[in-house]
Amino acid sequence: MKKLLLLALLPFSAVAADLMVCNGEFALCAASASVPTGKTIRVDGKEFQEGMAVCPVLTGKAIANGKLMNGSCKAPAGKVWSLFSTVTEYPQAPTWAVVSMTPRSFVTSTEPGGGMSNQWSFICTKQAKKVNNVQLANCLGPINESPWDNGHVAPGSTAFTAAPVGAANPVGGVIPSKGK
């Protein structure tokens, strides 16, 4: 059921031409928080606040936005791409034990940590040491950027994530509006 919910939320019409399936290592940030780095990041010609999320590295098939990855699933040495997957159990902070994901919606705000972060198809650097036998990666991506159209996410937007309640700038996406 959770897989169907996640797939239903993925707006294939918005990015269908850019979707590609990668097979291999990837970071899954779906249940991660994101902290501002103090830098900015440009996506599709627009500037956003940059956030960093710590995410587990998994292996398998995952969905990517080829436009943001220059059409290649291959990451440089020591790095992985942060991608979308339909797995429902994976390592999650703070212990990095494998647990079931719990999707939820929330409303973005202007409060510190009240935004959302998009890490989908952005590059991550693998951490040197595993935690609880889990390879982790530091992923950089935009805060308050929509993964569907690369536009700015306004405060008061309904978004979804698998990050726990209280996670700062949780990784996720806004719920696409009909007609977009």
Image: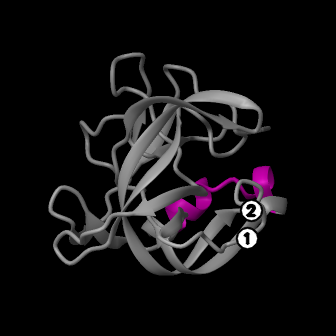
Residues 94 and 108: in front is 94
The region drawn magenta spans: 4-16
Residue 92 colored in magenta in the image: no
Residue at the spot of label 2? 66
Q: Is residue 41 left or right of residue 70?
A: left
- Above or below: residue 39 compared with residue 174: above
Which residue is found at the position 50% from the left and 71% from the top?
26
Magenta span: predominant SS is helix
First in sequence: mark 2 or mark 1?
2
CA neighbours of label 1 inside 10 A, class few (<14), some (14 to 19), many (20+) = few
Mark 2–mark 1 CB contact (< 8 Å): yes
Which percent across, then down, holds residue 162?
37, 53
Indicate which label's residue lies in the foreground, 2 or 1: 1
* Mark 2 residue element: loop
Which percent across, then down, holds residue 167?
28, 39
Residue that lies at the very extreme toward the top in this rendered image:
110
Residue 152 visible from this viewpoint: no
Amino acid carrying label 2: it is Gly
Residue at the spot of label 1? 72
Which residue is found at the position 17% from the left and 56% from the top?
94
Number of numbered labels in the structure image = 2
Which residue is found at the position 61% from the left and 57% from the top?
121
CA neighbours of label 2 inside 10 A, class few (<14), some (14 to 19), many (20+) = some
Amino acid carrying label 1: it is Ser
Which residue is found at the position 65% from the left and 27% from the top?
47
